[in-house]
Amino acid sequence: MAIVNGCKSLFVASPIAVLLTTFTPDGHPDCFHSMAKTIIGVMGPGEQATEVDRQVAYRLGQEIAQAGWALLTGGRNAGVMDAVSQGAKSVGGLTIGILPDGDRAGMSQAIDIAILTGMGSARNNINVLSSDVVVACGMGAGTASEVALAIKAARPVLLLNVDRDSQQFFQTLSATVVAVATVDETIAQIRQLLPLERA
Amino acid sequence: MAIVNGCKSLFVASPIAVLLTTFTPDGHPDCFHSMAKTIIGVMGPGEQATEVDRQVAYRLGQEIAQAGWALLTGGRNAGVMDAVSQGAKSVGGLTIGILPDGDRAGMSQAIDIAILTGMGSARNNINVLSSDVVVACGMGAGTASEVALAIKAARPVLLLNVDRDSQQFFQTLSATVVAVATVDETIAQIRQLLPLERA
Amino acid sequence: MAIVNGCKSLFVASPIAVLLTTFTPDGHPDCFHSMAKTIIGVMGPGEQATEVDRQVAYRLGQEIAQAGWALLTGGRNAGVMDAVSQGAKSVGGLTIGILPDGDRAGMSQAIDIAILTGMGSARNNINVLSSDVVVACGMGAGTASEVALAIKAARPVLLLNVDRDSQQFFQTLSATVVAVATVDETIAQIRQLLPLERA
Amino acid sequence: MAIVNGCKSLFVASPIAVLLTTFTPDGHPDCFHSMAKTIIGVMGPGEQATEVDRQVAYRLGQEIAQAGWALLTGGRNAGVMDAVSQGAKSVGGLTIGILPDGDRAGMSQAIDIAILTGMGSARNNINVLSSDVVVACGMGAGTASEVALAIKAARPVLLLNVDRDSQQFFQTLSATVVAVATVDETIAQIRQLLPLERA
């Protein structure tokens, strides 16, 4: 049941869970099937979030949960992080919060799995590395750092509810950043970016 | 539904989920009930693990899962991390892996929630901060760093399947480190350390 | 000689070294005089840097060193990090490199103080926290993350040799981001941002 | 003057600065000569340090500085970190502090280069990765984590002013941990561990 060496490299470029069903003649799988859940990271403003940011985030959280994906956020009890997690929980989703602090003060009540990093904004890099797809919902300094780090780490990035100037800035940094207009389009794009899972 | 300020300090000293059932006259709770799961962190050797380390870890993982707690490990496909996660999965538990790398290569197949830190052994501090109780199973350099960081962060520490000299070393560092002799005793001690949850 | 409590708050908002010469009646200083050097952080593209990025960076490094400030970069042997450090060394400056890796492979030859983080792009947050003033020279995904993290951490940011669209994006995120046109203007702006040191 | 590829691997196992004097026929060096200073990391208790810990640390700092090495510590204004840095400064040494916080509050007055990590005890791994040799002076939970992380990262470790039980614990973890009895023996051992520099 060990990892077959030739398979390992599949997991280097992207954390997307891969299921390969081909078997070797002796009945052992060519590659392991990781049980790890698909994780969608949603990044957005905290205290500076607008009412629209929060409303869009809430609906996005519902759709992510209904698609069966785990939701990952910065975990704080504010703005988009909180709203998207509340949305996911409202339909029974699984929510992961990567907290900047070393304790649970300030954590969203809608977090199931609280990861306490104690490393402030340096945890933003963990947010994007752990996400199969990164969705920015709204814009602010922290969110901008996460989009930039996601580009650097070659994670797919969707921009939802993000102004035209910000879209242009990030699309100049990377041709793979995609602006989406609605929650439904976001979900459709995520499905496109997770092709192997659909089989 | 905001966090009542006087409540916040409860969460500073320890990440243990707290449910307070007293209500204010107007029917709102005095304090929030976080949905966050109780997380038991199990630390132990990777490639250097002994057969006994792995067998004890497997049974420990089963018992943690059956108690309804989430399991957190360093997430790699080796030694105690892998065995305890396999044990938890064998009875339907939820497993979290805090990986040292920025991709899923080398991850245990028994991880549900893969947190990719890309920060090597610095992630050991996240392991202990995120755990309500830290259990060391076996000993090695990485495990020793986690026990020491857990003491530093004032997380409760149990030493299972750890030699007498190591026990003595850590108990000299902190009077709150407890050596346990069996998996059953470990589970009983964890229950003691999570008192509010039992109510 | 301990830190007087009432003084501590001065150091919370900014890491700028402060010298307060007022003394209490009993002859003890009201506040300590830190020996810590002023650190100017220069961020910019690595392998994607243009020839202009590198030339501007080299001259900027010379001027920073001649002003007596320590230079901090991401430390790699590429692009702006390397050029600005080479510039600083060419006139006897002190250069600090905050490396993403856990070893010295890939380090610029012009680094005096090599800090090995082993934490990849998460070290970008250390780059900005440790800098009294952050200067972006050129633009790319990593640099964008550092400018955003600097804004988040309330560090002063100067944009040198950065296109108009990027300027506009970051100035929308924070009113305190300043675009500068030349190396001389950069140095003049840094002096403005370090007022207490000039006394 | 670029790094010759075949040389790079020399720097993977250890950060010790290497000077190779062999030249290719055309007069270019086979390998670069990094300007990076040799860094000696000294770890020890903060507020819990004993008077002896501090006195030994002060003398150790003086000797490290007089040997021409840069000193690296956790940078706080307490215990061994402060005393060893004060010692180094008393004879004109260069002192680096890797601070747990994101600002300069609580920093030792004797730090020249303040690296603000904002990542709490996770910075302990940076302390050891950045050190050519790690010296523990006294023992405590934080120090124990640093010794363990140093062993994990294959950095040479010396134990000075450390009790017999702690020595035995760490020497069981790694055969390369050396207990030293005096400051002079510590300096002599460091010289042994930095062989190429002596040439």
Image: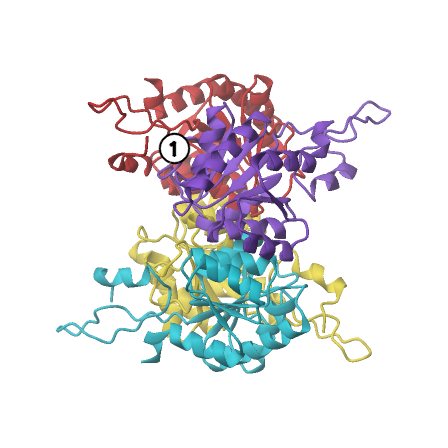
Chain colours: A cyan, B yellow, C purple, D red
Quadrant housing residue B5: bottom right
Quadrant housing residue B89: bottom left
- Residue at left 21%, top 61%? A6
- Residue at left 21%, top 71%? A29
Q: Tell me if I can see residue D43 in this picture.
A: no
Question: Picture coordinates of residue B160 (x, y %)?
Answer: 43, 56
Residue under mark 1: which chain is it in?
D
- Residue at left 76%, top 76%? B23
Q: What amino acid type should be assigned to the residue bearing mark 1? A: Pro
Question: Left of B28 or right of it: where is C178?
Answer: left
Say if A52 sits above or below C37 in the image. Answer: below
- Residue at left 73%, top 64%? B7
Question: Left of C124 or right of it: where is B16?
Answer: right
Say if B1 sits above or below A140 in the image. Answer: below
Q: Nearer the viewer, residue B93 or B170?
A: B93
Question: Left of B24 or right of it: where is A53?
Answer: left
Question: Picture coordinates of residue B95 (x, y %)?
Answer: 43, 68
Q: Nearer the viewer, residue D67 or A184?
A: A184
Question: Picture coordinates of residue C46 (x, y %)?
Answer: 42, 44
Say if D82 sits above or below B150 in the image. Answer: above
User: Where, quadrant-wise, is the C terminus of chain D in this rendering?
Assistant: top left
Residue placed farthest to the right in the image? Answer: C25
Question: Left of A54 or right of it: where is D171?
Answer: left
Q: Nearer the viewer, residue B172 or C138?
A: C138
Q: Nearer the viewer, residue C89 or A172?
A: A172
Question: Picture coordinates of residue B163 (x, y %)?
Answer: 40, 48
**Residue beneath label 1, please?**
D156
User: Where, quadrant-wise, is the N terminus of chain D in this rendering?
Assistant: top left
